[in-house]
Amino acid sequence: MKTYPMTINGKAIDTGRTLDVINPALGRPFAAVPAARPQDVDAAVAAARAAFPAWRATPHAARQAMLHALGGALEANMPELMDLITRETGKPLQGLNNVGSGMELGGAIAWTHVTADLPLEPEVIQDNDQARIEVHRKPLGVVASITPWNWPLMIAIWHIIPALRAGNTVVLKPSEYTPVATARFVELAQAVLPPGVLNVVTGGGDIGAALAGHADVNKIVFTGSTRTGKRIMEGAAASLKRLTLELGGNDAGIVLPGADVPAVAARLFGVAFHNNGQTCACLKRLYVHDSQYEAICNELVRLARAVRVGDGLDPQTELGPLQNRAQLDVVGTLAADAAAHGGRILSGGKARAGQGYFFEPTIVAGLSNGARLVDEEQFGPILPVIRYSDVEQAIALANDNPNGLGGSVWSSDLQLAAAVGKRLECGTVWINEHGAVQPDAPFGGVKQSGIGVEFGRHGLEEFTAIQTVKIMKH
Ligand code: NAD
């Protein structure tokens, strides 16, 4: 079994102990990474701190060229990285609606190139006889990036590339469940970047906490659960670290009356079940009008029974296993709770016997807000379909949740759908779509789904501090 390196200051570090990484399709380890110690966190932050002055002083064009070269390294190593992502996350190589490791790599490459090209010019606020006022964007220093297990490499890229583009240096801590492709990418990146500019430490929550609380870290960019996000925010207070927090979602979708049922159901199924529901902005609660409730449920059940579940390395597979046993247990508990509290399990409802962390794609009718499956983020292949009788009620139910990541409205009446959508309390609303993100449009949560945004100019600016320069002319 191969051990993938942890890179600090351009060098592979052996800590004398390793962490096994499990392939969830088999329930067995397939690789290992070094188990970082607290002194490795100190060394990584020190390396990033030492590399910062030269990196900050590197001209924009030179930094941009290096970032494009990182995009080239991702492209050149795509088959290997896709294979590693499928083995560590369980997601298929292609997958339902082409959402799989191929998309994760494709996204990582696209985000790298688009973000590398983002301008970061000073803004001129005033330039007259009296004074010139310029607003400059300066890097913050050392950025700590902490990532989850669902889209490990793509989310690492979402953190790293804008941080580096703005002139910061980075210490990355991937999820202990899925550190392999990320560690391999950081190793590849050393051929492009100066030592210390991008470092990775591999370990669990304790190592994440040591990094997030480190006195010499200036900013934390964190993607993961709301619970961990709150702990990170508490720890950041001591030195007022800057924060971007991309946290949990429990996204609602509302189907307005009069929808074309087969067409809409196929799209709804895709946006709820791709990556087995293990995406922050998957559709997680579906509100359907009385008049089409049975028809949409029936169509979703047909799709759930037809979808091909299996090992992600099999090219026929559309949905893989859950990424880890704990998440499999969460989904099983929510299914049992739904059945015990009036939910009708229309398809699936249980884990598969045999090896791996597989759960049958599950559609649940008959629940509403107040049931655990509706109120909590399931992060798995189980969708509650909730009946409503008027649109005001649907909007109120959709907003009745502490999360506010995304939301969607489905209708052929685009004006009406947009008007309803703007009333949803969420960071992004989609009309006849859900969860689709792109590198030039800001994305982030409101309420307890997070603080700040990623992507595009707005996301890039979160890795900077403003310096206002006022030059008096007389
Ligand atoms: P998690 O919070 O359990 O872990 C995320 C990371 O935090 C891991 O690297 C973990 O080791 C680390 N960590 C754990 N305890 C820590 C601590 N005390 N201090 C610092 N770091 C610590 O989340 P997860 O289960 O890996 O990810 C799933 C969650 O992520 C879901 O809620 C999902 O919605 C959310 N998510 C959000 C977005 C978004 O953009 N909003 C994107 C993807 C996933």
Image (tube, rainbow, N blue to C red):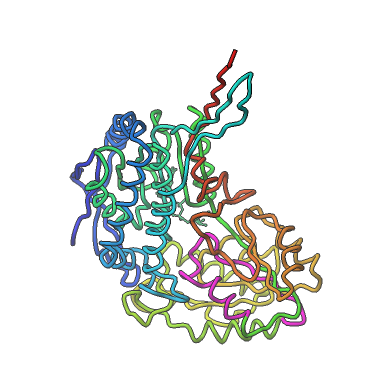
Provide the residue span drawn in magenta.
264-292
Q: Does the magenta stretch include residue 275?
A: yes
**Left or right of 373: which side holds 205?**
left
The residue sitting at 61% across, 59% down in the picture is 406
- Residue toward you, 50 or 455: 455
- Residue toward you, 436 or 222: 436
Q: Is residue 258 at least partly visible in the picture?
A: yes
Q: Which residue reaches farthest top?
A: 474
Q: Is residue 290 magenta?
A: yes
Q: Position of residue 351 (x, y in %)?
A: 45, 75
Q: Position of residue 145 (x, y in %)?
A: 41, 44
Tell me the quarter of the image containing the N terminus: bottom left
Which of the 4 image quarters holds residue 319? Answer: bottom left
**Left or right of 146: which side holds 402?**
right
* Count of marks overlaid on the render: 0
Q: Position of residue 109 (x, y in %)?
A: 37, 59
Which of the 4 image quarters holds residue 53? Answer: top left
The residue sitting at 36% across, 63% down in the picture is 105
Q: Position of residue 208 (x, y in %)?
A: 39, 43
Q: Is residue 324 at least partly visible in the picture?
A: no
Give the vertical position of 108 relative to 265 (above or below): above
The residue sitting at 66% across, 83% down in the picture is 261
Tell me the quarter of the image containing the C terminus: top right
**Left or right of 254: which side holds 119?**
left
Give the vertical position of 34 relative to 423 (above or below): above
